[in-house]
Structures are given as structure tokens and as C-alpha cells.
Amino acid sequence: MSFKAPQSVACVIGLKRELQEPWLRKPDEPSAAAEGLRQQTANLQGSRAQMRGIATHTQEMCANTAVATGMKGATKVMGAMNKQMAPAKQAKVIQEFQRQSTQMDMTIEMMSDAIDVL
């Protein structure tokens, strides 16, 4: 049974070997291990960006849930207040007040006309 090292460990070992034996590669071309390590770094950065995006979306969903829960509570409170205030009853009270106010205005006008005649 043989142990197979992960690819990143193999890249690091390859880089160390190339640093110790620089005559094995041409001076102008990058080493295969360095290129592999560069590619793994790029992949890791892409994965990190995706994870940050997922975390942001998760936070947004949590905030939306909290807002929805708050709206649910507000709706219940408004419904309870609506039942307690009885809008139909309030409308009748307002109409009665308007009727009495109009009657009072007419009475005041008649009294002021009667005083003016004297």
C-alpha cells in the first residue's frame, strides 16, 4: 500500500527540488510545480470569493426573514386594533357628531339673527 501525497504537497516538494537543483530547468520557463501552485492559488481565491458571496446571501436571507416576522407581528397588532376600534361604530359616532354640529351652527345663527332684530 503506497501513500499518495496531495497535489499541493507534491507542488511544494517539486518547488524545493527545483530550488535545490536549478540546472534542471531552463531559466526562461516557469517550473511546472510553480505553475501548478499558481493555478491552485487562483482556484483557492475563486473559491473564497464564492464563499463570501454565499455568506452575504445567507445574511440577506436572514435579514429578510426577520423583516417578514416583524411585519407579521405588526399585521396582527393592526388587526386587533381594528377589531377593538370597530370602524363601523366609529363612523356612526362621526356622523352623529357632524349632525349635532350642523344643528348647533343653525341654532347659533338663528339666535344671532334674533339678537340683531332687537
Image (cartoon, rainbow, N blue to C red):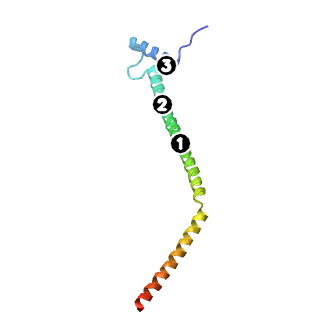
Q: Which residue is mark 2?
A: 48
Which is in the foreground here, disc 2 or disc 1?
Answer: 1
Question: What residue type is disc 3 on?
Answer: Ser
Question: What residue type is disc 2 on?
Answer: Arg
Residue 68 spot, x, y in % from top left? 56, 46
Q: Residue furthest bottom?
A: 117
Dot 3: element: helix
Q: Classify 108 as above or below 37.
A: below
Classed neighbour count for the residue bearing mark 2: other residues with Cα under 10 Å, few (<14), some (14–19), many (≥20): few
Q: Which residue is mark 1?
A: 66
Q: Classify 14 as above or below 60.
A: above
For the N terminus, give its image quadrant. top right
Classed neighbour count for the residue bearing mark 3: other residues with Cα under 10 Å, few (<14), some (14–19), many (≥20): some
User: Residue at the spot x=57%, y=51% of the render?
Assistant: 75
Q: Mark 2 or mark 1: name the one nearer the start of the chain.
A: 2
**18 vs 52, nearest the viewer:** 52
Q: Which residue is mark 3?
A: 8
User: Residue at the spot x=43%, y=85% of the render?
Assistant: 112
Dot 1: element: helix
